[in-house]
Image: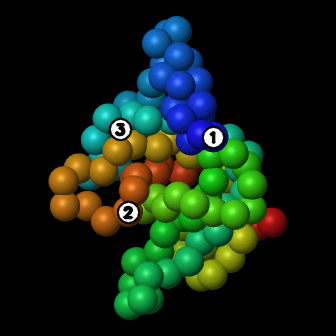
Amino acid sequence: MKKAAFLSILFLNIACGDQRPGAKCPDAGPFVMTLKNEPGRIAPDSTGKNFYLYFSTEGSLTYTMRAAPCNLGKEFRAEVNVFFDGDFYKTRTGSAGDYIVYIRDMDYR
């Protein structure tokens, strides 16, 4: 139910003329949302080579979504809790993760 309400608000905001940032990630599909000052967690996959941003659109600390950052700084390639600003895009076919995210700002929490 919360997810449906969030998506309704998201589409309403986009339909009302929200500025959509251009894709800055090579595998990015259509723009989905921008999140600012949100809590999240960076963690590697089972191989330890790919890192993902785990987050929740409700701002809770129970992370239900995953995104592949296309510009993750070396200092954040570890298991760390963060606050972040980012632009989220759908993944193109064959990409890993639920979304691709261009991180505008990130800091440890």
Q: Which kind of residue does numbered mark 2 sit on?
A: Gly
Q: CA distance from mark 2 to mark 3?
A: 17 Å
Q: Which mark is residue 2?
A: 1
Identify the residue under disc 2: 97
The residue lying toward the viewer, choosing from 41 and 1, is 1
The mark total stands at 3
Residue reaching furthest bottom? Answer: 47
Left or right, 25 with reference to 95 = right
Give the residue at x 30% y 50%.
Answer: 91
Q: Which kind of residue does numbered mark 1 sit on?
A: Lys
Give the residue at x 38% y 63%.
Answer: 97
Tell me the colour scheme of the image: rainbow
Mark 3 crowdedness (10 Å alpha carbons): few <14, some 14-19, many ≥20: some
Identify the residue under disc 3: 23
Q: CA distance from mark 2 to mark 1?
A: 21 Å
Dot in front, 2 or 3:
2
Dot in front, 2 or 1:
1
Report if residue 19 is visible in the image: no
Question: Circle 3 — which element?
Answer: loop
Residue reaching furthest right? Answer: 109
Q: Which kind of residue does numbered mark 3 sit on?
A: Ala
Earlier sequence position, callout 3 versus callout 1: 1
Residue 63, position as x, y percentages in the image: 63, 63
Report if residue 53 is visible in the image: yes
Residue 86, position as x, y percentages in the image: 56, 45
Earlier sequence position, callout 2 versus callout 3: 3
